[in-house]
Image: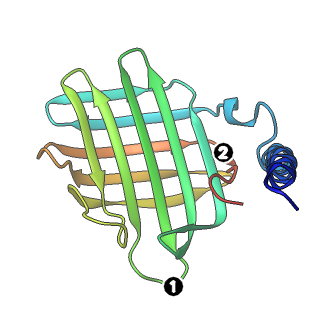
Amino acid sequence: MNNQTNRGVSLVAIILLAGFVTEISAQRRPAGEAQVKQPMQVSLKVGSQTYQSSEPGSCTYAPVASIYQIVSEMWSVQQSQQARSLSLTFWKPKDGSGDMVTLTVRTGDGSHEVNTVRGGGATSGSGKATFAKSGNGGTFTVDAKSKDGAPITGTISCSTFARHAAEGGL
């Protein structure tokens, strides 16, 4: 084949691959799934600030997930209300090694982050979160210190967890 034919074949292959990837993505994350919100209760003390909220948020669960090739169960919680927000991802490795957490809480005095995930570079902050299942939901108890030194303590409760939609890779 000549160069022009090769370019044409390559272009067709790219178009077909893009359609295939779009189709797989549509199968993996049904439309509107990310917008589902569940009842939540948040009661955190973050440095000198209090973060109390009963606004709905996103609570999801994946029975099998992976982070830095550590196969784990994974729970994810997000909530935002005006200038405040929180994001928690809790990893329970299947190999029995210690639980890992990423937590970002934005309050009136700034953003506070904790990352205890192993295997992907430097961690930041310290502490832990634990999870207690209750029916279809559960409660995370946080006892941590953010990378800027602010203590973060309290609970985050979800009444139920939706299925977590896979992200990244095919």
What residue is disc 1 on? 95
Quadrant position of the N terminus in the picture: bottom right
Observer-nearest of 89 and 22: 22
Look at discs 1 and 2 and give the one toward the viewer: 1
Q: Position of residue 57 (x, y in %)?
A: 56, 31
Q: Quadrant of residue 19?
A: top right
Q: Position of residue 106 (x, y in %)?
A: 31, 30
Q: Quadrant of residue 99?
A: bottom left
Mark 1 is surrounded, within 10 Å at the Cα level, by few (under 14), some (14 to 19) or many (20 or more) other residues, namely few
Residue flagged by tag 2: what amino acid is it?
Answer: Thr
Q: Position of residue 132 (x, y in %)?
A: 50, 60
Disc ID at residue 160:
2
**Residue depicted at 39% across the width and 58% down the height:** 101
Observer-nearest of 2 and 15: 2
So how many labels did they put on this image? 2
Q: Residue furthest bottom?
A: 95
**Residue depicted at 35% across the width and 17% down the height:** 83
Residue flagged by tag 1: what amino acid is it?
Answer: Asp
Side of 169 where 44 appears, left or right? left
